[in-house]
Amino acid sequence: MKIVGERVIITPMKLEDVYFMMNWGKHDNPLFFDYNLPSLTSKQVEKWYNYKTRRGNNRYYSVFNEDSTLIGYMGIKKIRRLWRDAVLGIVFDPNYMDQGYGTEAITAYLDYYFNVMNMRVMYLEVAKFNRRAIQCYKKCGFYTIDKYLDLFFDQQIDRNSKFFIQESSSFEIMEGKIYNYIYKMRIDRNAYGE
């Protein structure tokens, strides 16, 4: 299986792809440190790969650019075949962000998802402070259906950092804990076809 866009090729994820991902760039903004891939041993790489790809209700893919460089990965999880829906996740090497690859990868995948897999609805969840991703998702046809608070992954983050202050409306401090707003978004087959 291969999904081809104008500048991207999406293929099922292979173990060797995960080893390549270990060389990706790192996010400088501490709000996005959770997206940085940690240094992993070979055993941990294999465990991560198996966790992502060996579960029956998940499918994970590698995204390559026009130079055949692995620039991202994406997956659908929580696949419910009876309801024909799933939840999208996507991560890109920071060195290849802001170049339109994310939008192109999602658009190419949506065509496959709705027309080949015959799915009905796709959901995703995104942090409110991840404005770049939200803009990309809206461009692809997703719209917000819900908003909720979730415990932020880094409870030790410097609340006086420019990054945290700039996105203060994305956070709530309750009983000494930091929570961030998450948007739940969706696109359905009818909206995609318009």
Image (tube, rainbow, N blue to C red):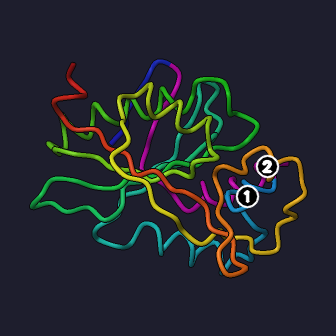
Identify whether 68 is placed above or below 12: above
Q: Which residue is mark 1?
A: 36
Task: Give, as a three-letter code, the residue at label 2.
Answer: His
Could you give the CA–CA distance between mark 2 and mark 1, rounded to whole angstroms?
6 Å
Q: Which residues are magenta?
A: 7-29
Identify whether 32 is placed above or below 94: below
Q: Residues within 10 Å of mark 1 (few under 14, many from 20)?
A: some
Image coordinates of residue 17 in percent, x first then y, are 60, 54
Identify whether 128 is placed above or below 143: below
User: Would residue 153 be found to the left or right of residue 13 on screen?
Assistant: right
Q: Is residue 166 magenta?
A: no
Q: Is residue 17 magenta?
A: yes
Image coordinates of residue 128 in percent, x first then y, are 57, 48
Q: Which residue is mark 2?
A: 27
Q: Nearer the viewer, residue 15 or 172?
A: 172
The part of the image, by quadrant, that contains residue 2 is top left
